[in-house]
Image: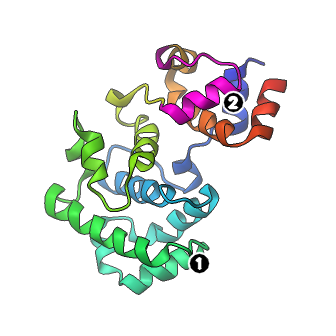
Amino acid sequence: MDTVQALLDKAGRTYAEDAGIRLADKPAPLYRLLVLSTLLSTRIKADIAVAAARELKRYGTPRAMLEASWQDRVDALGRAHYVRYDESTATALGDGAQLLLDEYKGDLRTIRGDELAERLRRFPKMGPVGVDIFCREAQVVWPELRPYLDKKTLDGARRVGLPTNPEKLAKLAGDDVHRLAAALVRVSLDKKLADAVRAE
């Protein structure tokens, strides 16, 4: 089995898939991806952030997030054990929902374009890591982002002996570049998984 196929088979689930988000170029799933990216931006285990995104599913639009009380958001984060940052994140999610409604009419599709990273960083708690996560995941529905293979994905490629040139990597993945990106992030973070992929 080749390395790319082994990666896709063993680790090719995106964070959005893990969080139960069916990505589409529509406001609600893109908003849920923004929430997930915000949660993953914090120094917390990815599985906890994904669980928190699942708990927040009922607030899957910026309007619903704002209609939820701050305590509702804190409680949802707590149920997922997202506890060290629950209060500040609950505030940030409310502020981010308000920003999205006020400036972009609740629709992330309006931020597409050359200044995407800068616009994403305007959302509370969205730093460079969150922007990378959002773009890696969104490339499946926003083709102009492809290939979005950031430093973390290239670290994973290096770890399993794949090319570190984004264009070459993208060619190896074809239409699955978003899944390859997810797998490469996972092997960059998990040496045992990387060893298992190399052993194929």
Asked if 199 appears above or below 20 in the picture, the reply is above
Query: For the stretch drawn in magenta, what is the main secondary structure?
Result: helix
Instruction: Provide residue 167's location: percent of width, then percent of height.
Output: 47, 15
Give the Cα distance between marks 2 and 1: 32 Å
Q: Is residue 198 left or right of residue 71?
A: right
Image x and y of residue 150, in percent: 47, 32
Pointer 1: what residue? Answer: 79
SS class of the residue under badge 2? helix
- Identify whether 31 is placed above or below 70: above
At label 2, the amino acid type is Leu
Label 2 crowd bin: few (<14), some (14–19), many (20+), radius 10 Å: many
**Lower sequence index among marks 2 and 1:** 2
- Picture quadrant of residue 142: top left
The residue pinned by badge 2 equals 7
Q: Residue at x 60, y 38 (%)?
A: 185
State which quarter of the image contains the N terminus: top right
Q: Is residue 3 left or right of residue 199?
A: left
Q: Which residues lie in the magenta part?
A: 150-167
Residue 94 % position (x, y)? 31, 72
Question: What residue do we see at 47% from left, 55% from top?
Answer: 41
| Residue at 22% across, 35% down | 113
Quarter of the rendering containing residue 118: top left
Q: Residue furthest right?
A: 199
Q: Dot 1: few (<14), some (14–19), or many (≥20) neighbours within 10 Å?
A: some
Q: Which amino acid lies under the numbered mark 1 shown in the image of this protein?
A: Arg
Residue closest to the eye, 119 or 142: 119
